[in-house]
């Protein structure tokens, strides 16, 4: 288990994606993002659609904090639904599944419809929560995939995906050009969810094969 990463500042070399304004984010049409910003957080405005970063990434570490609406009368996929799309292609589900005994393929922390979380780390609605994702992009030769994408995910400091393989893009990807870098996309899915303190640290594809400094 990680230490609590809530409120962690971006390390040296990280790209700050959201720290109180939506500069560097667009909607589906490429215009300025229209979600609401207040008190250092951005609120999903479902009617305006998803938003995405102009910045794109290959291998990277992503830190993101989110808060779910309290929807006690809702059930299943209608319970504060959103999603975090790594490279715009691989969705980590956002959903109020707190208290559920065994999370499934569509619950909070799942690689949507592909890999269920190892355990339920979801906190109750209205509490701030954290995703810390280590993403390894597909290894391709041209457009041919030689190795699939992989993900390690800590959810509120709890390991819920341990270097899992992601065989293919999840539903509703931005595109299927997995050989290329991709954006971070946040989903508008009819419910209000809040996000804050979003940053990404690009990672090298491989470490050095020599001893000592270059």
Image (cartoon, helix red, strand yellow):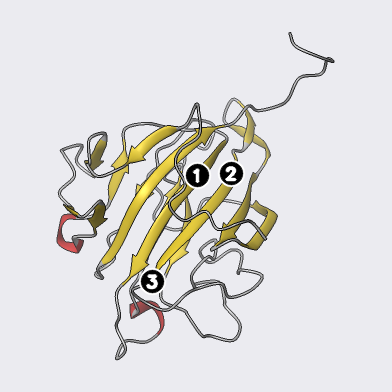
- Among the two numbered marks 1 and 2 on one chain, the one whose residue lies closer to the N terminus: 1
- Name the outermost residue toward the right: 211
Q: Secondary structure at mark 3?
A: loop
State which mark lies toward you, 3 or 1. Answer: 3
State which mark lies toward you, 3 or 2. Answer: 3
Distance from Cα at disc 3 to Cα at disc 2: 25 Å
Residue under the point 52% across and 50% down: 169
Residue under the point 44% across and 41% down: 9
Specify few, some or many for label 2: CA neighbours under 10 Å numbering under 14, 14-19, or 20 or more.
many
Decide if residue 207 is on the left or right side of residue 115: right
Residue 61 position within the rendered picture, expressed as x and y whole percent measured from the top left? 55, 41
- Among the two numbered marks 3 and 2 on one chain, the one whose residue lies closer to the N terminus: 3
In the image, 117 versus 23, the foreground residue is 23
Residue indicated by mark 3 = 127
Report which quarter residue 127 is drawn in: bottom left
Decide if residue 67 is on the left or right side of residue 210: left
Residue indicated by mark 1 = 62
Q: Considering only vertical position in the picture, is 136 above or below 1? A: above
Residue 166 position within the rendered picture, expressed as x and y whole percent measured from the top left? 62, 52
Residue indicated by mark 2 = 135
Residue 177 shows in the view? no
Decide if residue 84 is on the left or right side of residue 140: left
Specify few, some or many for label 1: CA neighbours under 10 Å numbering under 14, 14-19, or 20 or more.
many
Residue 200 position within the rendered picture, expressed as x and y whole percent measured from the top left? 47, 38
Decide if residue 133 is on the left or right side of residue 127: right
- Name the outermost residue toward the bottom: 73
Are the residues at dot 1 and dot 2 in contact (C-beta closer than 8 Å)?
A: yes
- Among the two numbered marks 3 and 1 on one chain, the one whose residue lies closer to the N terminus: 1
Distance from Cα at disc 1 to Cα at disc 2: 8 Å
């Amino acid at each position: 288990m990680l230490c609590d990463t809530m409120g962690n500042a971006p390390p040296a070399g990280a790209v700050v994606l959201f720290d109180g304004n939506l500069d560097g984010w667009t909607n589906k049409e490429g215009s300025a993002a229209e979600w609401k910003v207040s008190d250092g957080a951005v609120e999903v405005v479902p009617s305006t659609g998803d938003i995405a970063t102009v910045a794109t990434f290959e291998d990277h570490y992503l830190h993101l904090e989110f808060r779910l609406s309290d929807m006690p009368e809702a059930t299943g996929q209608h319970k504060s639904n959103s999603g975090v799309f790594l490279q715009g292609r691989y969705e980590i589900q956002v959903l109020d599944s707190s208290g559920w005994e065994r999370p499934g393929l569509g619950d909070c922390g799942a690689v949507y419809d592909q890999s269920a979380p190892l355990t339920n780390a979801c906190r109750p609605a209205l509490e701030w929560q954290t995703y810390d994702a280590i993403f390894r992009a597909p290894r391709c030769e041209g457009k041919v995939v030689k190795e699939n994408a992989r993900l390690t995910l800590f959810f509120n400091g709890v390991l819920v995906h341990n270097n899992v393989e992601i065989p293919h893009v999840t539903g509703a990807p931005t595109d299927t050009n997995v050989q290329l870098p991709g954006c971070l996309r946040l989903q508008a899915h009819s419910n209000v969810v809040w996000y804050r303190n979003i940053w990404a640290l690009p990672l090298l594809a491989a470490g050095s094969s020599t001893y000592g400094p270059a």
